[in-house]
Image (spheres, helix red, strand yellow):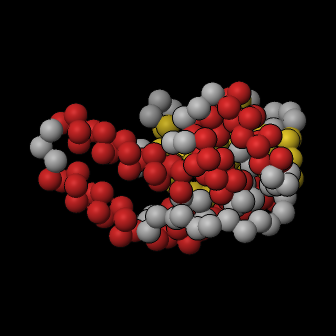
């Protein structure tokens, strides 16, 4: 994407109120962390001031509302891409189309309404909403999680961010059981409970 397009996309992402780390923005925009800092400077030159949070859960956040043109993709847009994937006979091109679809979802999916529109199963919508609330309110969450190596374990997590990868939603969170950051796939969470404990 062009520099202008990347700056607009970064502004659009931050306008949702979510916090993004420099590395996350770098990955989404497919540029270096240095370029992400340059985009922040460009936005601030235009009068759009972005807060920088330091520490373990640091990153960029936009703490006020700005008017951003909506470029969100709808379910029918993904269906068009799916139709092209189905008819594409070249294996390499098909893989590129699938990757493109994942990239588009990763950039443009963010709000609860979009999660429902993109046909998340009902149980995953509930998990998605609870985890998003926990991120905003900085509350701990108790989950039962299926791991391929350890089966089902009970954990208390401190959610930091939600992201979409391949065909599933994940929550990046500090896991108190493991004492480290982990990525939890929503479909492998069997039970979830929002706790009143703040972190």
Of residues 173 and 167, the one nearer the viewer is 167
- Residue 107 makes an appearance in the image: yes
Q: Is residue 176 above or below residue 196?
A: above
Q: Is residue 116 left or right of residue 56?
A: left
Of residues 125 and 68, the one nearer the viewer is 68
Q: Position of residue 6 (x, y in %)?
A: 60, 45
Q: Is residue 173 above or below residue 31?
A: below
Q: Position of residue 149 (x, y in %)?
A: 47, 30
Q: Position of residue 61 (x, y in %)?
A: 79, 50
Of residues 151 and 33, the one nearer the viewer is 33
* Residue at image coords 18%, 36%: 91
Q: Quadrant of residue 21?
A: top right
Q: Is residue 149 left or right of residue 44?
A: left
* Residue at image coords 16%, 47%: 88
- Residue 154 makes an appearance in the image: no
* Residue at image coords 69%, 53%: 11
Q: Position of residue 141 (x, y in %)?
A: 72, 53
Q: Is residue 147 left or right of residue 100?
A: right
Q: Residue furthest left?
A: 89
Of residues 185 and 57, the one nearer the viewer is 57
In this rendering, the count of numbered labels is 0
* Residue at image coords 64%, 40%: 25
């Amino acid at each position: 994407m062009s520099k202008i397009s990347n700056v607009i996309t970064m502004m659009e992402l931050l306008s949702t109120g979510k916090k993004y780390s420099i590395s996350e923005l770098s990955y989404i925009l497919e540029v270096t962390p240095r370029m992400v800092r340059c985009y922040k400077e460009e936005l601030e030159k235009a009068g759009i001031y972005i807060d920088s949070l330091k520490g373990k859960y640091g990153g960029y956040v936009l703490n006020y509302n700005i008017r951003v043109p909506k470029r969100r993709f709808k379910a029918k847009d993904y269906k068009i891409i799916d139709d092209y994937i189905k008819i594409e006979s070249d294996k390499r091109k098909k893989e590129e189309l699938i990757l493109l679809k994942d990239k588009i979802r990763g950039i443009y999916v963010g709000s609860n309404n979009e999660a429902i529109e993109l046909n998340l199963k009902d149980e995953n919508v509930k998990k998605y909403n609870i985890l998003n609330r926990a991120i905003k309110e900085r509350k701990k969450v108790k989950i039962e999680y299926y791991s391929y190596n350890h089966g089902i374990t009970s954990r208390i997590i401190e959610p930091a961010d939600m992201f979409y990868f391949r065909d599933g939603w994940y929550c990046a969170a500090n896991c108190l059981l493991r004492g480290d950051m982990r990525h939890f796939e929503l479909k492998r969470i069997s039970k979830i409970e929002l706790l009143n404990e703040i972190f």
